[in-house]
Image (spheres, rainbow, N blue to C red):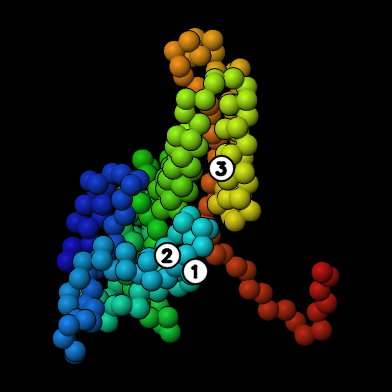
Amino acid sequence: YDKKAIVEYSRILNTSYGTMHFPWCWVADPDVQGNMLLMAPSYIFMYTFLSNLDNNVDSQKWFPPAGVKRATARVVKKPYFEIGSVVLNDWQNDNTARVNPIMKLKQYGYVIYGQYTCLPAIDMFTHSALESLNVRLIANVVKKKIFDVCLNLAFEPNTSVLWLKFFAQMDEFLRYMQYNEGVYAYKIVMDESTVTTDDINHLRCPGKVYIAPTRTAEFFDIDFIITEAGALFNN
């Protein structure tokens, strides 16, 4: 095992459509009692992701499969090796490392503790929101909805009525996402500013959908202060 080689491999992938988890883990053999199988991290991720869906609610589509609430890897009996605080700190402090550890967290057992995609930061000052898996999931959900709406509106007359239908359907969906913590804000544009006469003559109907995806809290910085006895606090 070479932690530097693992990080370098994650950089080579260079895509927001993939994730990298580590290490391989031992899981129970469903066919032979007492036997264990060594499984790839990708299996652990998908099994954990699917088994931790709560009632398969829509909002889970854009919540990141990471942490003790949504990514407790109950299937894992033991990892190929334990990831300790030293390795974890190395990965978290490396702005271009994109490895999500499968590690033990005290009473919670083994947990997928990271939601990086394989899109590396250019440097410590230049980042993309798509470095986070939840943002990639949000983008995928919105892109799919745009495709579905356009598919249902195809071959309709290219008039303001069509533009309003597109706006209404996307607005309803994005308002739902906003209520369920998928986006902070959004904007939909399909009108004379996007659809020109030339577009109409060439059977096109351009539009724009802007979103500000919800970001996750991954690091907490809490000040804990002990005061003298008898101190008063103003709320």
Q: Nearer the viewer, mark 2 or mark 1?
A: 1
Is 13 placed above or below 51 here?
above
Question: Around disc 1, counting alpha carbons within 10 Å, would you say few (fewer than 14), some (14 to 19), or many (20 or more)?
Answer: few
User: In the picture, which quadrant includes the N terminus?
Assistant: bottom left
State left or right for residue 31 relative to residue 235. left
Residue 77 image-quadrant placement: bottom left
Query: Residue 42: x, y in percent?
Result: 26, 62
What residue is drawn where x is 22% and y is 46%? 12
Is 23 placed above or below 195 here?
below
The residue tagged 3 is 212
User: Could you tell me which secondary element the residue under label 3 belongs to?
Assistant: strand
Question: Around disc 3, counting alpha carbons within 10 Å, would you say few (fewer than 14), some (14 to 19), or many (20 or more)?
Answer: some
The residue tagged 1 is 55
Calculate the distance from the C-alpha at mark 2 to the C-alpha at mark 1.
Answer: 17 Å
128, 176: nearer the viewer: 176
The amino acid beneath tag 2 is Ala
State left or right for residue 198 relative to residue 78. right
The residue tagged 2 is 66
The amino acid beneath tag 3 is Ala
